[in-house]
Image (spheres, grey):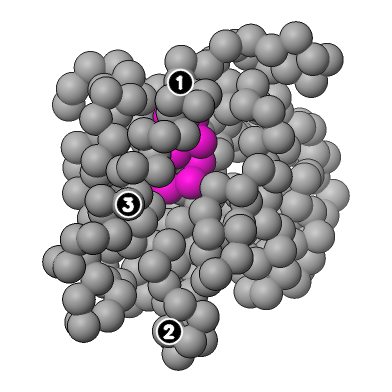
Amino acid sequence: MFRKGVILTMSLFFLTQNPFLYGASGFDHQYSLWNRFLDQYAGEGRVNYSELKANQVALLDAYQEMGKVTKAEYESWTKNQKIAFWLNAYNVGAILSVVQFYPLKKGLSWKALAFPENSIQQIPDVWDRPVFVMLGEKTSLGGIEHEILRKQFKEPRIHFALVCASIGCPVLREEPYSAELLDQQLDDQVRQFLTTPEKFRYDKTKNILYLSPIFKWFRKDFEQTGGIVQFIKKYVPESIVGAISGNSKIEWLSYDWSLNERVGKS
């Protein structure tokens, strides 16, 4: 662990000396560095962690760029710029957390035993351990999700953009989130999620909705849209919109915590 910490610290030091990244032009809201990483290491919603472990430069570039944003700069941004920033930051942070402990190994705690060996849940305190220093403060994955995105923006579609490095999560989008495209990107993420049988399906004969536990865990977040059913009806095919109602029975699907790992090059 000490050697990993030294490598990360040295990498971050050299990155901060790069004037190209932090010139007078301000923050890159197109997330070119994060986009470069996605092009190199992600595909079909999965990440090549094995290859990434051997060469982390692209990931660290994106990580360090986001960590350089100041509070004053951030406060001048639009709402959509802020949301896009935190969505991208969370996804960078989740991947970085996995890489630091990759290959993942089964822990001995009761919690660890409840999850697959190749799961982000095997990382101790993964949701609460600091991943970034953002806006001058230590920030965790849980802090980004619950204290910032959920509490400050109250946008339920974020749950289909935050990727916790697991198969049960939404797919990792192969482009950064940006303010200009945010609404279209979030709508598209919801639609993709609701076309995956392991995450959503509807039995019209029995009037049963089979839903990802994401809807159960964050039920309150969907209340502002009229509840889970009303939210879903905006995104499912017309052929079932009329059949789904508050009388539809809900059954919860299992959540696959296995790592969203991709093997080999694209």
Is 51 placed above or below 221 here? above
The magenta-colored residue range is 92-99
Query: Helix, strand, or loop for circle 2?
Result: helix
Residue 110 appears in which quarter of the rendering?
A: top right
For image coordinates 15% across by 66% down, the residue present is 20
The residue that label 3 is drawn on is 13
Q: Is residue 104 left or right of residue 92?
A: right
> Tags 1 and 3 in contact by the CB under 8 Å rule?
no
The residue that label 2 is drawn on is 73
Q: Is residue 67 magenta?
A: no
- Counting residues from the N terminus, which is met first, the one under dot 2 or under dot 1? 2
Query: Helix, strand, or loop for circle 1?
Result: loop
Q: Nearer the viewer, residue 159 or 245?
A: 159
Whole-percent x, y for residue 23 in the image:
20, 76
- Counting residues from the N terminus, which is met first, the one under dot 3 or under dot 2? 3
| Labelled disc at residue 102 | 1
Q: CA distance from mark 3 to mark 2?
A: 22 Å
Whole-percent x, y for residue 181 in the image:
34, 71
Is 53 placed above or below 85 here? above
Q: CA distance from mark 2 to mark 1?
A: 34 Å
Instruction: Name the dominant secondary structure of the magenta segment.
Output: helix
Q: Is residue 162 left or right of residue 116?
A: left
Is 261 placed above or below 130 here? above
Residue 197 appears in which quarter of the rendering?
A: top right
